[in-house]
Amino acid sequence: MKGEGIYKDRGSKFLGFAEPIQDEAEAKARIAWYKKKYHDARHVCYAYRLGPDLWRTKDDGEPHGTAGAPILRSIDARGLDNILVVVVRYFGGTLLGTGGLMVAYREASKEALESLVER
């Protein structure tokens, strides 16, 4: 079961994917799968939460705190656990700035999580 979402801004496309995970090994395996599948993307950013004390984020070349942190906040805003959210960015040629990036990663992850919960 996987939720999906998409957000577009000034030519960039952000593909969001949310799926349940059981442990950190599974999270790492799924992240590697996304990186391989979307090898042509500029960035493959993510966040996951496994319990109250285990979480990870990755900005994957985006400015620090503009991708992984907004994704994790989307997870936490819904009170979810054992969840991985990956957002794949295809760069559209226009810089979005830190605020624009934070909105884009938040919205793509929000759509993916809402899609997952609806199923």
Image (spheres, rainbow, N blue to C red):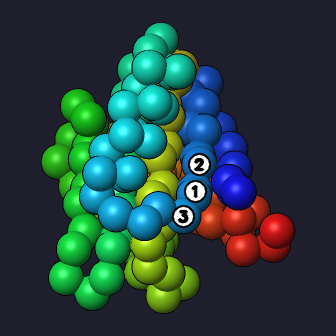
| Amino acid residing under circle 2 | Phe
Q: Which of the 4 image quadrants contains residue 45?
A: top left
Is residue 84 visible to the viewer in this orientation of the structure?
yes
- Of marks 3 and 1, the one in the foreground: 3
Residue at far top of view: 40
**Circle 1 sits in a helix, a strand or a loop, which is it?**
strand
Q: Which residue is mark 2?
A: 17
Q: Which of the 4 image quadrants contains residue 56?
A: bottom left
16 above or below 41?
below
Q: Position of residue 15 (x, y in %)?
A: 60, 39
- Tell me if label 1 and label 2 are in contact, CB under 8 Å: yes
- Tell me if label 3 and label 1 are in contact, CB under 8 Å: no
**Circle 3 sits in a helix, a strand or a loop, which is it?**
strand
| Amino acid residing under circle 1 | Ala
Residue sitting nearer the eye, 3 or 100: 3
Q: Position of residue 25 (x, y in %)?
A: 29, 51
Label placed on residue 20: 3
Label 3, residues with CA under 10 Å away: few <14, some 14-19, many ≥20: many
Q: Which residue is mark 1?
A: 18
97 above or below 117?
above
